[in-house]
Amino acid sequence: MTPPSPRPLPRALRRLLVPVLGVALAVSAALGVPTGAHAAGDRNVATPGNFTGYGFDQCLAPSQQAMNTWLVHSPFLAVGIYISGASRACRDQPNLTPEWISTQLAKGWRLLPITLGPQASCNPRFPRYDNDRTISPKQGDNGGYPTARKQGTREADKAVAAAKALGLVRRSTLWYDIEAFDTSKRHCRESALVFLSAWTTRLHEVGWVSGVYSSASSGIKMLDDARVNRPDRFTMPDRVWLARWDGMADTSSSYVRDDGWLPGGRVKQYQGGHNETWGGVTINIDRNFLDLGKGSWAAPETHCVTARIPDGVQVDLRDYRPITTQYAGVRRVTALQCQLREVGLYTGRLSGVYNDRTRAAAQVWQDHHGLQVGDRWTRTAWQTLLARGPGKLVKYGSAGADVRRLQRGLNASGAGLPVTGVFGGATDQALRAWQRAVPGVPVSGVASATTWQALRAGKS
């Protein structure tokens, strides 16, 4: 039944409601309730989340065209951006908008929002401008550093305001950049510790995750020493980003104890400023390796489950060898039956027997995909079936269903990967080896549209 159309409100009532609605919208704005375009930021995810992989940072946020090109061609999936702080070198960020933020997050980039505000009082390179300040080393009557504490709280509030304005959401990590300084100078060091402690405390109060970037041998070592020797004196950041330019893509450093911010609490900047070119686009960057939260991880597989096999999952195999005989192997045949069932070609039970019904369904797939139609189910046929679908761009650090599909497709060509759903070093090496063997596919370690198209075509 079609419901009746609602009657329009009387004109007098409409005149009464208009100012009321206006007041309601104003109150919503004052309380930070999103309306209209502002609600788009609500779709953003907390960043960087759980991630293990490569990242880069630079002074000026790259253009969208540069980000798109680097997503397809570079090994990076995380990017550091300077969002606030009066002492940052790139005060003007013409590319950094709410649309830029939401676009990168939607494409799978992990963002590291950085603040470079007041620096240690004994750092000779700061203040950088006429109107930025350093951390006050002045002690109060009780021997503390009340001004430094207020500065840290204020800088956290500014960073949160800047993050919200860009559409970043709570539970994201905000990073404070405190450049290297002489930690042997007591008041300079202690005031910096108080400042960073206040930064972290304030972020925790308002629901954000605290991170601190610094040189491993100065600011990070200072924090680690305070963590161990004075555990009740300062509030430690949740995560540290240590600058140690040793060229090693890991999160290790002799300046931080093995129990400090491990597991899942470290980023390491392992190479300083240099130009890199990917896809014809050059950016001056620092290189980083991240291992945060649980690291990149994928939920357990839930499809193709049957009690016939002890582990329950049928489709994830290290090797998809050809199927030629009726009893070719329960696991392989069951995996085939399940996959053919999912594309609507097989309606029987998961018997693990390559029977007439299974063979007939397989031949329909072969015919539809330009393969030789016959009783033999080949590696090429496996690859076309396992890699089917559009395929999301994935690279080192990615995780989820698309990574599983990639690993299965590579295993059909003999890669022998464990199908984990996590794109790590073994998957990277296997993909590059496959790309080298297939003409016309860039050897990038990135499963882009070109790679997926070749996989679906059964090329190897």
Image (tube, rainbow, N blue to C red):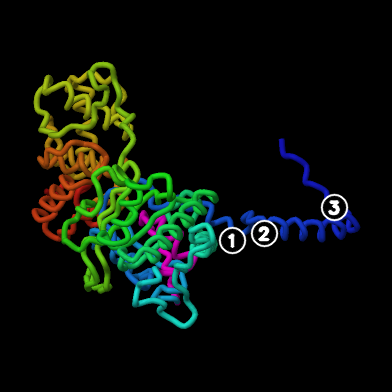
Residue occupied by mark 1: 37
Gap between marks 1 and 3, in whole Å? 27 Å
The residue where tag 3 is placed is 9
Check whether the beta carbons of the residues at disc 1 and disc 3 lie within 8 A of each other: no
Q: Is residue 403 among what the camera can see?
A: yes
Q: CA distance from mark 3 to mark 2?
A: 26 Å
Q: Earlier in the sequence, mark 3 or mark 2?
A: 3
Query: Where's residue 18, x and y in %?
Result: 81, 59
Residue at (31, 35) in percent of width and height: 343
Q: Which comes before the other along the chain, label 1 or label 3?
A: 3
- Quick one: which residue is furthest to the top in this view? 308
Tell me, for residue 201, which label it has, or none: none
Can residue 296 be spotted in the picture? no
* Residues drawn in magenta: 92-119
Q: Which amino acid, by three-letter code, is at mark 3?
A: Leu
Q: Quadrant of residue 450?
A: bottom left
Residue 373 within the segment the image draws in magenta: no
Residue 416 left/right relative to 2: left
Which quadrant is the N terminus positioned in?
Answer: top right
Please name whichever residue, 71 or 233, is drawn nearer the observer in this view of the structure: 233
Identity, as a three-letter code, of the amino acid under mark 1: Ala
| Residue where numbered disc 2 is placed | 29
Question: Looking at the picture, does residue 394 appear above or below residue 338?
Answer: below
